[in-house]
C-alpha cells in the first residue's frame, strides 16, 4: 500500500540528462574562452605584470573572452553538476543566475530604445577612447581595423576623429610618418589588389575633403552602425527573442527538476517516518 502511495514520485531522467548535456557544452566552451583569454594575456606579458591590465586607455578585447567565458563557465558548472548530482542548491543558483542575465538583457534593450541619443553619445565616447589607444594594444588595433573594414567606416563620425591619436594627428609637432593619415582599414578596397596596402592611409587627411572620398571611407562608424542596425532589425530581434526563449526554457527545466528532486526527498522522508511509526 505504501509502495503504491509513493510510486509517482521520481526524477525525470530526460530533463536531468538534457540539462546535464546542454550545460556541459557551456562549461567546456566557457573554459575554452577563459583559456584563450589567459593565453592572450600571457603572450602580451599581462600575467607577469597584473597592474598593466588597467593601464590600457581603451578596451582590451581579451576582457570579452574572460567575462563571457567566466559567466558561461559558472553557469555551465552549476547546471551540469546540479543536474548530475541532483543538487537543488546548484540548480536554484543556475535558475537565479540565468534569470538575472535575462533581466539585465531585457533592461539593456529597453534602456537602449528609450535613451537612444545617450547610447549614441556613449558609443561615440567609447570609440574615441579606443582611437586614442589604437597603437597601445595589438588586439584592440585588430578589433578597430575589423570594425572599420566590416562597416566601411572611419572614426566615430568621420576620418578627422583620428586627430585624437598621437600618431595620426595633424599637429605641426607630430614627427610620426602616419601624421595626417588614417589606418589602412579606413581605405576603400580595390578588388584587383591581392595584397593589402597598409600605407594607403598615409597623408590622406592633408588632401581636400572632396578628394578623400576617392581613397577612404569618409562615413563614421556610429552612423554606419545605426544604418546596419536598422537594416538588420528583424535579424537582431529574432536573435534576441531566440536567446530569451532559450533562457526561459532553461529556467523552467531547472525549476521542474528541482520540484522533482524535492518531491522525491519529501516522499522518502515520509516513507521513512511511516516505517518508524509502524515498526514497534
Image (cartoon, rainbow, N blue to C red):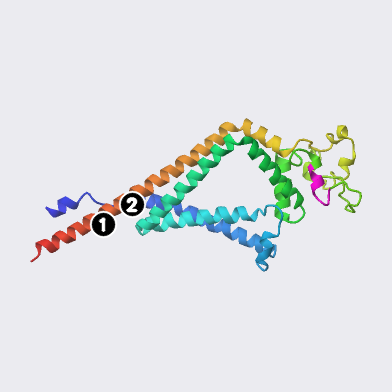
Q: Nearer the viewer, residue 195 or 120?
A: 120
Residue 266 to residue 229: above or below: below
| Residue span colored magenta | 161-168
User: On the rendered structure, is 52 left or right of 273?
Assistant: right
Residue annotated with mark 2 = 258
- Label 1 crowd (10 A; few <14 / some 14-19 / many >=20): some
User: On the rendered structure, is 139 left or right of 263?
Assistant: right
Q: Position of residue 257 (x, y in %)?
A: 34, 50
Q: Position of residue 204 (x, y in %)?
A: 87, 41
Q: Position of residue 221 (x, y in %)?
A: 72, 39
- Disc 2 to disc 1, how far (Cα)? 11 Å
Residue 66 to residue 45: above or below: above
Tell me the number on the disc at residue 265: 1
SS type, badge 2:
helix
Q: Is residue 196 visible?
A: no
| Picture quadrant of residue 182 | top right
Tell me which label, 2 or 1, sits earlier in the chain: 2
**Magenta stretch holds residue 45:** no
Amino acid at each position: 500500500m505504501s509502495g503504491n502511495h509513493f510510486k509517482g514520485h521520481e526524477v525525470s531522467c530526460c530533463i536531468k540528462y538534457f540539462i546535464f548535456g546542454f550545460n556541459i557544452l557551456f562549461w567546456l566552451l566557457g573554459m575554452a574562452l577563459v583559456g584563450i583569454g589567459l593565453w592572450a594575456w600571457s603572450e602580451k606579458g599581462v600575467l607577469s605584470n597584473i597592474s598593466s591590465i588597467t593601464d590600457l586607455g581603451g578596451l582590451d578585447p581579451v576582457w570579452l573572452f574572460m567575462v563571457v567565458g567566466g559567466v558561461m563557465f559558472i553557469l555551465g558548472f552549476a547546471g551540469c553538476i546540479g543536474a548530475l548530482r541532483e543538487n537543488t542548491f546548484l540548480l536554484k543558483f543556475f535558475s537565479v543566475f540565468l534569470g538575472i542575465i535575462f533581466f539585465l538583457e531585457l533592461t539593456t534593450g529597453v534602456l537602449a530604445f528609450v535613451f537612444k541619443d545617450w547610447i549614441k553619445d556613449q558609443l561615440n565616447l567609447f570609440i574615441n577612447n579606443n582611437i586614442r589607444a589604437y597603437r597601445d594594444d595589438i588586439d584592440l588595433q585588430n578589433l578597430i581595423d575589423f570594425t572599420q573594414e566590416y562597416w566601411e567606416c572611419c572614426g566615430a563620425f568621420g576620418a578627422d576623429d583620428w586627430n585624437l591619436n598621437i600618431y595620426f594627428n595633424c599637429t605641426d609637432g607630430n614627427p610620426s610618418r602616419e601624421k595626417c593619415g588614417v589606418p589602412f582599414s579606413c581605405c576603400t578596397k580595390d578588388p584587383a589588389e591581392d595584397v593589402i596596402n597598409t600605407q594607403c592611409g598615409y597623408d590622406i587627411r592633408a588632401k581636400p575633403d572632396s578628394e578623400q572620398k576617392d581613397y577612404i571611407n569618409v562615413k563614421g562608424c556610429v552612423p554606419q552602425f545605426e544604418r546596419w542596425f536598422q537594416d538588420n532589425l528583424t535579424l537582431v530581434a529574432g536573435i534576441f527573442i531566440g536567446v530569451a526563449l532559450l533562457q526561459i526554457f532553461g529556467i523552467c527545466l531547472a525549476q521542474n527538476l528541482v520540484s522533482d528532486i524535492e518531491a522525491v526527498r519529501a516522499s522518502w522522508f515520509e516513507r521513512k517516518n511511516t516505517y518508524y511509526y509502524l515498526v514497534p
